[in-house]
Image: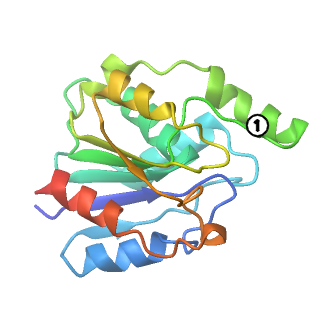
Amino acid sequence: MQKRVFIVHMWDGRPKDGWYGWLKKQLEQRGPEVHVPAMPNTSAPKIKPWVAHLSKTVGTPDKNTFFVGHSIGCQTILRYLETLPPDKKVGGAVFVAGWFTLKNLETKEEQRIAKPWLTTPIDFKKVMRHTSKFIAIFSDNDPVVPLNNKISFAKNLRATTIVQHNKGHFTADDGILKLPIILQSLLKIAA
């Protein structure tokens, strides 16, 4: 059965932003079917619509289904996995700039939008029923994701964590249009 990869973009993101198109092309050259869905209301993301959209896009997941999340996309993937029936298995997930805490939110509006994502608990036991393959990638100078999120991903998901130097929030504004570590990480868990 063909492997499928779903790349879930960041808050205020678009499917063709930053490194998403590069990763899609790299993966497709290796055989997987790759989807980068345009998530709903990207400027003010909400948990239920984002999880529902991802669920609809994926259809029926299986052990050949893999995920890559960027920032709020990581939260979306975790919350999606939490909703799956206990017997459903997926291949794994790579998280880029994932978070359970944030810093430097600039406006009251950003704080209002982020609050449900920060305060609605995730049942990690439910998430881990579906796969044990998690890799979480962080930058040592991310302006909004504190590096201590690395500890939370390792503790809560037993994720392998990787810290990249000077990559900011892994956006095009940070000069990140390719990110080989994501490709390497995904190929590792999909092998």
- Say whether residue 149 is visible: yes
**Residue indicated by mark 1:** 113
Q: Which of the two residues, 118 or 14, is positioned nearer the viewer here?
A: 118
Residue name at image x 55 percent, y 48 percent: 71
Element type where label 1 sits in the image: helix
* Image quarter hosting the C terminus: bottom left
Kindly identify the residue that appears in the image at 19 percent across and 76 percent down: 30
Quadrant of residue 178 within the rendered picture:
bottom left
Q: Where is residue 89 in the image (x, y as percent from the top left)?
A: 20, 36
Q: Nearer the viewer, residue 16 or 59?
A: 16
Residue at 55% x, 69% y is 15
**With respect to residue 175, does 38 lie above or below?**
above
Q: Which colour scheme is used?
A: rainbow
Number of callouts in the render? 1
In the rendered view, does 115 fall on the left or right side of 68?
Answer: right
Quarter of the image where the N terminus is located = bottom left
Q: Can you give x and y, in whole percent of width and height, for residue 114 in the image?
A: 71, 35
The x, y position of residue 115, in whole percent, is 72, 28
The one of 158 and 83 positioned closer to us in this rendering: 158
Query: What residue is drawn where x is 63% and y is 30%?
Result: 117
Q: In this view, does 100 lie to the left or right of 124?
A: right
Identify residue type, mark 1: Ile
